């Protein structure tokens, strides 16, 4: 009987933070603690780290609830929630420096606000979307959607904590409401069965199994 290899997708997302315990408290309050791993690191990082984690929720009231819980847990509002052509959303920066976007395509509320996350997307800002897309395809990832040199999205397993997508770095920064300038570490490490490797924009990947329901913390690599 032929054995079919499992599709390659993101198995884990590890944020490198100065204070894992404080970061864990924030992620628990923000209801994303089962999707994110934490690792202590003092790596230098200034300005835009090049990525954002985006939560897709059901309606505007849910967006407001998530953003309020983030602010109550110490986050800073970068882009207040507002209506747009595509829906409703806003951006906050966690105490550890990670940018989070919360959005919905719904224009109106249809019920009570919940703490349910429909989807979590990791958007990597890259210089050349086409080149990065082909790099990831060569590592075994499968393109789910692609819009020329502007955006690419990869297929993911149900067990994957996030969906991976690529966006032009400057376009992503503009969407988030921050400057595209930044230096040093991205402060994020991704895991998949095809790791370890480093992509053309310096995002590091490591060999990893599927993320369990309990988040983990570990010391940074030396």
Image (cartoon, rainbow, N blue to C red):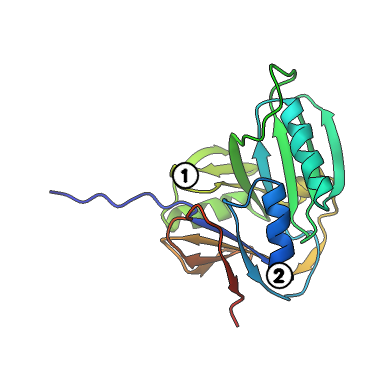
For this rendering, which residue is in front, 56 or 48? 56
Cα–Cα span, label 2 and label 1:
26 Å
Q: Which residue is mark 2?
A: 185
Rendered residue at 71%/57% (across/down): 25
Q: Residue furthest left?
A: 1
Is residue 62 visible from the viewing direction of this image? Answer: yes
Pinpoint residue 52: horizontal percent, then vertical percent.
70, 50
**Which residue is pictured at 46% across the width and 51% down the height?**
9
Which residue is disc 1 drawn over?
Answer: 156
Q: Element type at marker 1? A: loop
Residue nearer the viewer, 182 or 221: 221
Q: Is residue 11 left or right of residue 54?
A: left
Question: Where residue 106 sits: x, y (%)?
Answer: 70, 22
Q: Is residue 208 above or below residue 108?
A: below
In this view, 187 is above or below 133: below
**Quarter of the rendering occupied by the C terminus:** bottom right
User: x and y percent of residue 220 in the render?
Assistant: 61, 76
Using the image as rendered, state which of residue 206 and residue 40 is in the foreground.
Answer: 40
Q: Secondary structure at mark 2?
A: loop
**Residue 175 seen in the current view:** no
Label 1 Cα neighbours within 10 Å, binned few <14 / some 14-19 / many ≥20 = many
Task: Specify which label sits upstream in the sequence, 2 or 1.
Answer: 1
Q: Are marks 2 and 1 in contact (CB under 8 Å)?
A: no
Question: In the image, which disc is placed on residue 181?
Answer: none
Horizontal relation, residue 92 to residue 4: left or right: right
Work out which residue is located at the far bottom of the displayed protein and give it. 222
Residue 19 occupies which quadrant of the picture?
bottom right
- Please determine whether, in this image, residue 145 is positioned above or below residue 4: above
């Amino acid at each position: 009987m032929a054995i079919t290899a499992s599709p390659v997708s993101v198995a884990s997302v590890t944020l490198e933070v100065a204070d894992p315990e404080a970061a864990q408290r924030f992620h628990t309050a923000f209801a994303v603690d089962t999707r994110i791993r934490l690792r202590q690191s003092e790596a230098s990082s200034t300005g835009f780290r090049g990525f954002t984690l985006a939560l897709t929720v059901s309606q505007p009231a849910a967006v407001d609830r998530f953003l309020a819980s983030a602010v109550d847990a110490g986050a800073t509002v970068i882009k207040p929630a507002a209506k747009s052509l595509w829906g409703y959303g806003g951006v906050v920066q966690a105490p550890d420096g990670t940018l989070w976007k919360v959005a919905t395509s719904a224009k109106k509320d249809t019920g009570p606000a919940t703490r349910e996350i429909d989807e979590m997307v990791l958007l990597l800002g890259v210089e050349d979307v086409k080149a990065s897309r082909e790099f990831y395809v060569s590592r075994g990832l499968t393109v789910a959607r692609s819009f020329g040199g502007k955006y690419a999205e990869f297929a993911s397993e149900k067990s994957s904590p996030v969906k991976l997508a690529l966006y032009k770095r400057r376009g992503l920064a503009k969407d988030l409401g921050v400057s595209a300038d930044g230096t040093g570490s991205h402060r994020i490490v991704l895991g998949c069965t095809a790791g370890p490797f480093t992509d053309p924009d310096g995002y590091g990947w490591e060999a990893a199994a599927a993320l369990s329901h309990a988040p983990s913390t570990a010391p940074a690599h030396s």
